[in-house]
Amino acid sequence: MVEQHVVSTGGRAGDDLARALEDAARGLVERGADEDVEHTLQLIVRGAIHTIPHVEQAGVSLVERGGIVTARAPSNDVVRELDELQTELGEGPCLDSIWYEQRTLIEDMTQVRARWPRWAVEAERRGIGSLMAFQLFTDKGSAGALNLYASESGVFDEATADTGSLFATQAALVLHGARRVHGMAGALASRDLIGQAKGVLIERMGVGPERAFALLVESSQQTNIKLVDVAAWLVDEAQKPGRPGNQRR
Amino acid sequence: MNDDGRPFDPRVHQAEGMLTARYGVPITEAAVMLRAWAARGHVTVTEMAAQVVGTLVVRRGNGHRGR
């Protein structure tokens, strides 16, 4: 169980904040935040709820290729619905944080109906009184935001938003690391597959490694299938028992 | 090294692919064969892979069709 370490708002708030963020950062690293992206997102969401004052629920919005915003690691169904609803409606504070503002603070949900008329009504209907959203990153073709929810209005203010912003900065760094590791693991797996496919072609076609790679590239271009998928198909096909030429010698 | 202990060398993967195509065995089994041959020949897996790839490529004329 994660130790609750909510920051106080008294005179020792600065010390408490530093300690809470330190604990949160250590927690993200020690609990294996770099192992996979989904696990990292869950740690970030749990960490935000336990660290930032008045936050009851949280989630991360990630924009994938094609501009689709997906709700990731939501702490409950309401968060999932409200995060997904923003994509459906094309409006909402999380989208604004992703694309236009580094942080969005809603102290009272009833006061933002003019800005997000359809989404704000749905949020109120689901019992949300306040919200903070922080941009996590913007890369080529992808972006993300950390969304923090509270049922009461008036619990989030600029001081809380500063705390959230500091947490989001650390979360963004950890998430960036996790995404890089994930990307590198994928690249390594692709490289292995392509190497094995080259080996299959070297054996079958009697060509050298360079020509084998050129054949893979040509096949990929002609079929409009990604190189790694062509390689995967070839390797998979070579392993099938009973294929002519695949009898054990 | 890879997570599974296989060295980072493109020739290792190529050799695995070649053995799979030649003997009709799964890639995992080809990797085991390669490792066993390396141990028997007192060479590293990378060196054995280089021999497997090099031998075949040289035998077939290094890039030209042999069949």
Image (cartoon, grey):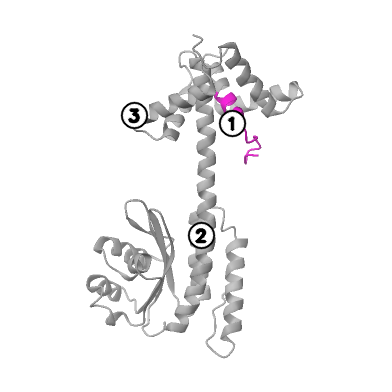
Question: A143 or B23: which is nearer to us?
Answer: A143
> Where is residue A12, by image quadrant?
bottom right
Foreground disc of the pair 3, 2: 3
Q: Residue at coordinates 46% horizontally, 13% vertically from top-left?
A: A244
Q: Nearer the viewer, mark 1 or mark 2?
A: 1
Name the residue rendered at 41%, 84% in the picture. A155
Q: Position of residue B9 (x, y in %)?
A: 62, 33
**Quick check: marks 1 and 2 in contact, CB under 8 Å?**
no
Q: Secondary structure at mark 2?
A: helix
Looking at the image, the residue that sits furthest to the top is B67
Report the amino acid beneath label 2: Leu
> Dot 3: what SS?
helix
Neighbours of disc 1 within 10 Å: few (<14), some (14-19), many (20+): some
- Same chain letter for marks 1 and 2: no
| Left or right placement of residue A80 versus residue B29 in this view | left
Q: Quadrant of the N terminus of chain B?
A: top right
Label 3 crowd (10 A; few <14 / some 14-19 / many >=20): few
Is residue A125 at all visible to an observer of this figure?
Answer: yes
Task: Give the residue number, with chain letter if any, for mark 3.
Answer: A223
Three-letter code, disc 3: Thr
Q: As drawn, is A216 to the left or to the right of A125? A: right
Question: Label 3 lies in what chain?
Answer: A
Q: Is residue A151 above or below residue B59?
A: below
